[in-house]
Amino acid sequence: MDFDFNSNEPLYKQIAKQLAIQIIVGTYKIGSRIPSVREIALLTKTNPNTVQRSLTELEEEGLIITKRTSGKFITEDKAIIEKYRHKILKETVDKFIIDMNKLNITKAEIISYLKENKQ
Amino acid sequence: MDFDFNSNEPLYKQIAKQLAIQIIVGTYKIGSRIPSVREIALLTKTNPNTVQRSLTELEEEGLIITKRTSGKFITEDKAIIEKYRHKILKETVDKFIIDMNKLNITKAEIISYLKENKQ
DNA sequence: TCCTTTGTGTTAATTAACTAATACAAGTAT
DNA sequence: ATACTTGTATTAGTTAATTAACACAAAGGA
């Protein structure tokens, strides 16, 4: 688990994002157990409380579920994950379009710009 | 000059962004004088130092030029403004594509998604 | 039964990010 | 010449965000 330490985003958010993406993309399988708070803390060289805070956010989203003394698990509910994926997608696209509109750039221009852009 | 006070972005960045966009878009004409630090502070109900900080950033970009005791002016150099516009454009697009790739979404998909999106 | 592992709650420490107060410096106009 | 307006530097205050320390709670296995 590597982080973008160049970022000035708080650790707990970076961890939360990484995990969320791993869930969305399927690196962490549905229903599977994720490493314990302390294990993740070791892996990421952070404090367990920092990890805890990340996971609380993901739990609020319904992505993970806590079984008190045996660990935390990815939800079994595929729909929740799909919904979350869509939420992130929408947020990202909407913000992008707003940013572009502020610059007086239309959607048509965006599309042609994207087509030119190598990547 | 209104601000998105809902945002948790620092004031000085919000002010800087607003001004930068107004320059890019042409609301502030090339070579023209912008209001004094104190005037902007009054308009935005902020402290002159906060405004100063915003303007320093824009000056580092070359967008504005200070004439010590008579005020600050938009650069005469059209190319600088165009270059800055392009820089912002590129940053915005690149970040967007990176975000999307993290979600395993290809550029082709982005384009079709954009076409669907009403706005 | 007791030790280990799990999550969690509370509180404190730290840091740093912003904003503001204030005084100074240097032109400009009256 | 003097007062006004401009930008700027330095410093302090304030607040909030983040991280860490530590102790507690509960289940499960040796």
Image: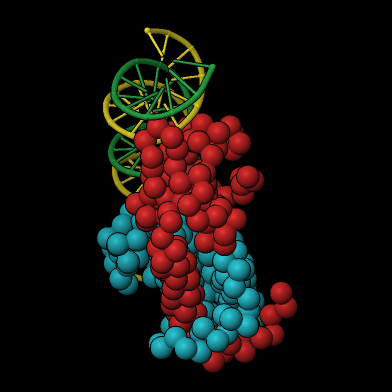
Chain colours: A red, B cyan, C yellow, D green
Residue at the image point whose x is 62% and y is 49% from the top: A4
Q: Position of residue C5 (x, y in %)?
A: 50, 26
Image quarter (top left, top right, bottom left or bottom right) of the N terminus of chain B: bottom left
The answer to whether D16 appears left or right of A6 in the picture is left
Q: Is residue B42 in view from this perspective?
A: yes
Q: Quadrant of residue A55?
A: top left
State the image coordinates of residue B86 (x, y, percent, origin top left): 62, 77
Q: In the figure, residue B87 lies in which quadrant?
A: bottom right
Position of residue B114 relative to residue D26, above or below, is: below
Inspect this view and state whether residue B49 appears: no
The residue lying at 57 percent from left, 66 percent from top is B103
Report the front residue among C13 and C23. Answer: C13
D4 relative position to C28: left or right:
left
Residue B77 vs residue D21, the one in the foreground = D21
**Number of marks in the image?**
0
Relative vertical location of residue B92 with respect to residue D7 in this rendering, above or below = below
Q: Quadrant of the C terminus of chain B?
A: bottom left
The residue lying toward the viewer, choosing from B115 and B45, is: B115
Whole-percent x, y for residue B80 in the image: 63, 76
Residue at (43, 54) in percent of width and height: A75
Question: Where B68 sits versus C1, above or below?
Answer: below
Taking the spot 41% from the left edge, 60% from the top edge, the residue there is A77
In this view, which residue lies farthest toward the right? A118
Question: What percent of the width, then of the height, locates residue C14?
Answer: 46, 26
Direction bottom: furthest residue: A108
